[in-house]
Image (cartoon, rainbow, N blue to C red):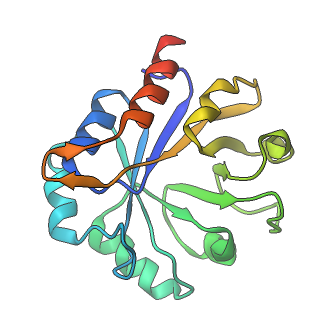
Amino acid sequence: MMPKTTLVKSITSLSEARYCSGMMVDYISFDLNPDSPDYVPITKFEEIKNWLSGVKILGSFETSDIFQIIDTLNTYSLDGFIFSENQNSMLDDLEVSDKFLEVSKDTEFDENLNIYYIIYTGPIENAVIWANGYNVLLGYEFENVDDQSDYLAGYAFKGSKELRPGINNYDGLMEALEKLEDRV
């Protein structure tokens, strides 16, 4: 088990998803927007999901249409959702157990939103600002694991593309997760 909460976003292959599950990552996420290069269709998603245990499954979908997100949540039976900073107005309108919001240094939103995790993607020195009232995951650089600040709830990383079936280069992710594992 990792000493801090971990999330890996944009999973596209079974091998990477199984690696994350085996390393006791808390959350993995799939891009569910058909226009995205990281899109995972429902058949591939179900194939991957059926091989996993112990990890919560999230989705992300870059759209301003709340009904597309609701349909995606229902179709994929997700444990949670990652909202981009321009989707923050939808947070209170969607019923999903684990809500994540990606923010950068300049993100503005209602501080009373019903959200549990903030994925902070701005300069590390400003991440502490978001830690007042929220659990902050530092994302998405692998080097962020070197920051062991007490205010951090954990880390978010991005997955990598499979080069061809069974061949995936996720060395950066492996190194980052192994560093975290060594802290236990």
Pinpoint residue 79: horizontal percent, then vertical percent: 39, 54
Residue 184 in view in this figure: no
Residue, x 36% and y 66% (percent of image)?
38
Q: Position of residue 105 (x, y in %)?
A: 81, 57
Circle count = 0
Q: Is residue 106 left or right of residue 98?
A: right
Residue 154 % position (x, y): 60, 34
**Relative to 89, is 170 above or below?**
above
User: Measuring 14% from the left and 68% from the top, which residue is drawn there?
Assistant: 43
* Residue 180 visible in the current orientation: yes
Residue 108 vertical placement versus 28 (above, below): below
Residue 48: x %, y % from top left: 19, 52
User: Residue at 36% across / 81% down in the picture?
Assistant: 71
Please report the residue visible at 18 percent of the width from the left and 45 percent of the height from the top. Answer: 167
Q: Quadrant of the N terminus?
A: top left
Frontmost residue, 106 versus 67? 106
Write down the quadrant of residue 131 in the picture: top right
**Where, by quadrant of the figure, is residue 92 drawn?**
bottom right
Left/right placement of residue 154 relative to residue 41 reads right
Q: Is residue 20 above or below residue 93?
A: above
137 over 40 or under it: above or below: above
Viewed as shown, does residue 140 lie left or right of 118? left
